[in-house]
Amino acid sequence: MTIVAFDFDGTLSDSEMTVLLGQRRGVADEMAAITERAMNNEIDYATSLRERAALLDGLPAVEAAAAFDEVLLRPGAADLIAALRAAGVHVAILTGGFERGVEAALEREGVGVDTIVANRLPMAGDELTGEVEGPLIEGTKDDALESLTDDLGVEMGDAIAVGDGANDLPMLQVAGQAIGFEPKDAVRPHCDTVVTTMGELQDLLEKDDVL
C-alpha cells in the first residue's frame, strides 16, 4: 500500500480557512499577515495558529459555518483524490486547518479521503471562543504521518507527502517522496519535485506508477 498525505490550505485548496473566517469577523488582513509569516517560517506554527484563532473570539456559529462553506478544492483535486483511492492508495489530509472546512469542501465535490487529521475551533454557546484545539497545533505532521504509517503497516519510504508551507516541512522531510505544490521559498529546497497544478501532480503520480 502507498500513502499520499496532502496538506490542505495552499495545496488541495487555494482557500485559506482562517482568512475566510477572518473576513466574517473583520480581521482578514491581520489573519493574512500572520499566515504569511508562519508559512515563511518567521514564527512557529503553533503561535501563529493561536494568534489567528484569538482574533475570531465572538464570531457567531452561523458566520463560521458560512465561512467553511466557502472552502473549495482546487480544480482537478477531487478527480485526483478519486483516482488515487480507486488505485488503492490511502489518501490522507494532514492539516493545521479545521475539520469542518475540509469536510465541507470534500462533500461539495462528492469525494472522500481515508484519513483526516485536523484541528478544531471550540464554541461556547453560539460563538467561537477564540481558542483552538487538536493534534496539529503543537504536534507536527511528521508525527501524524509516522503514526499513520505505523497503523497501516506501511514503510515510510512508501509514503508521499504533498505540501507548500513551512508547517509541511516535517512530513516532507520524512516521507519517501516530497512533492512541493507551489512551495514557499523556504520549503522548495526540501522538495524532490515541484508541481503547480493538480493535473501536473496527477501526471507525476502516473509516471511514478502510483496511479
Image (tube, grey):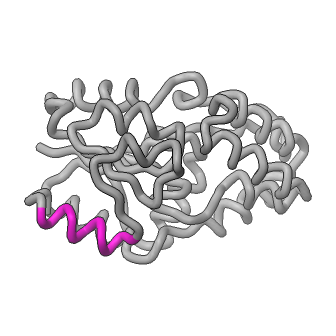
Which of the image's four quarters has the N terminus? top left
Q: What residue is drawn where x is 59% and y is 45%?
A: 97
Residue 124 seen in the current view: no
Horizontal side, residue 53 vs residue 174: left or right:
right
Near-viewer residue (156 or 25)? 156
Does the magenta-highlighted stretch encompass residue 13? no
Q: Main secondary structure of the magenta part?
A: helix
Horizontal side, residue 96 vs residue 1: left or right:
right
Horizontal side, residue 107 vs residue 205: left or right:
right
Q: Position of residue 32 (x, y in %)?
A: 76, 53
| Residue 162 vertical placement versus 166 (above, below) | below
Does the magenta-highlighted stretch encompass residue 199? yes
Near-viewer residue (127 or 76)? 76
Which of the image's four quarters has the C terminus? bottom left
What's the magenta region?
197-207
Q: What residue is drawn where x is 23% and y is 30%?
A: 149
| Residue 174 vertical placement versus 193 (above, below) | above
